[in-house]
Image (cartoon, rainbow, N blue to C red):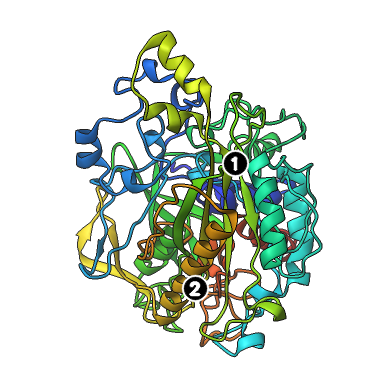
Amino acid sequence: MSQQVKIYDAIVVGSGASGGWVAKVLCEKGAQVLMLEAGPPRIPTRDFTEHVWPYRVRFRGFGDTKTFLEKQPVQRLCDACDEYSNQFFVDDTENPYTSDPDKPFMWIRGRQVGGKTFCWGRVSYRYSDYEFQPASRDGYGENWPVTYRDIEPYYDMVESYIGVSGSREGLPQFPDGKFLPPMRLSCGEVYARDIIGKQFGWRLMPDRSANLTVPLNGRPACHYCEQCQRGCFTASYFNSPSVTLPDAARTGRFTLVSDAVVSHLAMDDRGKASGVVFLDRNTHAEREARGRVVVLAASTLESTRILLNSRSRRFPDGVGASSGTLGHYLMDHFTVESASGVIPSLRSSRREPVGRPMGFMIPKYVNADARFSDKRFLRGYYLAGDGRQDLYAYAYGMRGFGRELRRKIREEIPYMFTIYAQGEPLPRYDNYVALDPRVKDAWGVPTLRFRASYGENELVMAKAMGDKLGEIVDSLKLENPAPIPQRLSIFGKNIHEAGTARMGDDPKKSVVNRFNQVHDAPNVFVTDAACFVTQGCYEPTLTIMALSARAADYIASEYLRKPA
């Protein structure tokens, strides 16, 4: 007698910021959830290295260049990928992709239970209607089919639970949230805040971060070791294996299968998903899971790749491709970084007792505040950085040994100030990904080919960003200022990819509706940043989590209360 195949209420593909929230909400509302993750689980005692000293690693933290070049030539370009943390990043030889030689793309990926939430930057900003409804202001492109008012309750839910530290500022273009106490500004940042506020009329504030400044929900406050990209034993910043996934598991309705590389959706004759097909990462054996609903939360580009690979007679170009927008409107933030120098009025023989994993930020003012309109380009940018005594960098550059070296270092610790700008890209149809007809990954799944570049609007904005950084450096009278780079960051470098399965009310112009539901296949949802219509200039992760919780609420109301 053949064994009966279990049909889950929902299959969630991906275990990071998005998938964790979908699973938590659905399980707590009574759903039987199967989560599929392409990579392995991470074991803190083996994989977390935030408290490992350089003498305990083979290359003292500088890495094995030969191995990096052979196995992780792309991943090593990420600042967070080094000898301590390269385990959180994929093997590029197993996970190839292609791009036009004149339009390179930097695809940084983390395949493991938790995705990139182990080493993300933890920057947590709300979008406002300057992001959700920008076309109403400047006439370019499309608005989102939702407003800030629609998403606000889910921002509240997410922030209240994961813990986001920040200061309340009352700025319409930068909504306040349910904050934990903010981290302190350093002396250098207070100095910069006063000058920038007086000369430019812009507000410098502590960054908003998913690091706990007080205990929350059984998790202790951050102890400020400042090595967040290496994992966190105390779970003092948000990552899904420490926060949302345990909540799902506690319900008894959650099943996690790791090392499950999803290749495509299994579709029935009615145009609905019956489940997903995946391959065992180690044995390459093919398996199929069955579910009433499928939620793709595998990250923007992986979710899009799964949709493109889900081809059949009914969906010859992939599930969700009928509008012609699937794979298109790829966006990623661009940065001009970084202006820096020494604050000469702040010198000390003692290290300032301000430890924290985050710096400062200055929200978007240009083209968001009528006093700071710039007609040369659409949309705007924000600034962020750090002002602190740069003990370690200072010590690296000094010659000497032992007691005499320590004495020289302690004689005078310079006060460094660093600032960069991050701008908003415009969504453009001709920035896209498609399946590469010749290249497959290690499991035989067709990979992506990228064709994306920044346009004239981004180039003009970047010039303005660089000019503004120069003005700020001059106003602070920094010594030994570093030259401001004239080139834009490479597309993909900021790891904020968005937009390839955009949201909209019109099925002829979009892939998913206002509840992240695929127009072509109503029991398929896409909850990561692939659904973004615009990107704004702010980091997307908090918005991803809010949209995921909202979509899960909708799934529960529409599917859990109805018979299969």
Q: Which mark is residue 190?
A: none
Query: On screen, 56 above or below 303?
Result: above
Report the Cα–Cα distance between label 2 and label 1. Answer: 38 Å
Give the image quarter of residue 127: bottom right
Q: Which mark is residue 464?
A: 2
Query: On screen, 253 above or below 398?
Result: below
Give the image quarter of residue 436: bottom left
- Residue 398 lies, in percent from the top left, at 37, 26
- Residue 313 lies, in percent from the top left, at 35, 77
Q: Quadrant of the C terminus?
A: bottom right
Seen from the viewer's position, the closer of residues 327 and 414 is 414
Residue drawn at (40%, 81%), measured in percent from left and top?
Answer: 456
- Residue 387 lies, in percent from the top left, at 59, 43
Q: Residue furthest top?
A: 403
Contact (Cβ within 8 Å) of mark 2 with mark 1: no
The residue pinned by badge 1 equals: 240
Total numbered badges shown on the rendered structure = 2
Q: Quadrant of the N terminus?
A: top left
Q: Residues within 10 Å of mark 1 (few under 14, many from 20)?
A: many
Q: Amino acid at mark 2?
A: Ala
Q: Amino acid at mark 1?
A: Ser
Q: Secondary structure at mark 1?
A: loop
- Left or right of 116: which side holds 561? right
Q: Residues within 10 Å of mark 2 (few under 14, many from 20)?
A: some
Q: Residue furthest bottom?
A: 139
Res 500 seen here: no
